[in-house]
Image (tube, rainbow, N blue to C red):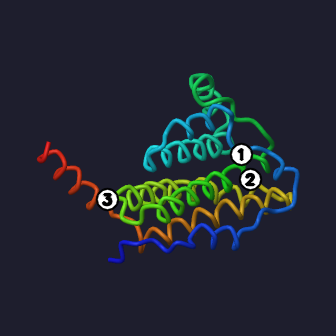
Amino acid sequence: MNKSMPPALALCLLLLFPPAPSAAQRREHLTPEEIELVRDNQELDKRTAVFIKAAQRRVSALTDPAGAGREAAKESKEWGEVKGTRAQLLYDVARILEEAVVNIDDTHQRSPESALLRKALYRLSEAAGRLIPQLTPLRERITDEPERDQLERAIETAQEIVEAAKTHAVTEEDLKAKEKGGKKGN
């Protein structure tokens, strides 16, 4: 299996899915608290986990507003309040996934042999794989063109991550084997 990730993965994603001209572009896709969590988590796998949770919070707000509201009450101090229109939340999901890819690509540029690269991509692809079936049913409910564009962008970005991970990420079995090996060495 090819262990290196193409350096232009993030660039390809951004070229394939340019931001749609809308009010959503002027919006910050992360809450101030999430931005602080990203800054605080300098290790790639931990930073990727922040992006994953941020994207999932928005998908939950779209697909299960009542459940997301209960979670938001518990998490608001640490993670901030997720708010916005449906189009804005969909924009946020796509941008968060893109930012996670850019972080992985940046790490690859600086440290191509980092053990965290493939692990972070695997975790991101695993999360993207969970987001796709949550977002796909929204296609039936969304008729507004800007919302539809943002939904398609979010789904396509998640699909691109899943596809990229098939050739560049570790498998779950690889992670388990590494974890077992690491415990023996401690």
Instruction: Using the image, determine if residue 77 lies above or below residue 155.
Output: above
Q: Quadrant of the N terminus?
A: bottom left
Q: Residue at x 69, y 73 (%)?
A: 16
**Which residue corresponds to mark 2?**
91
Q: Residue at x 39, y 62 (%)?
A: 118
Tell me, for residue 172, which label it has, or none.
3
**Which residue corresponds to mark 1?**
29
Residue 133 is left or right of residue 46, and the answer is right
Three-letter code for the amino acid on which mark 3 is drawn: Glu
- Residue lying at the far left of the rendered structure: 184
- The residue carrying pointer 2 sits among few (fewer than 14), some (14 to 19) or many (20 or more) residues within 10 Å by Cα, namely many
- Tag 2 near tag 1, CB within 8 Å: yes
Query: What x and y, as percent, mark residue 114?
Result: 37, 59
Query: What x and y, as percent, mark residue 147?
Result: 81, 56
What's the distance in space between the residues labelled 2 and 1, CA to CA? 7 Å
What's the distance in space between the residues labelled 2 and 3, CA to CA? 30 Å
SS of the residue at dot 3?
helix
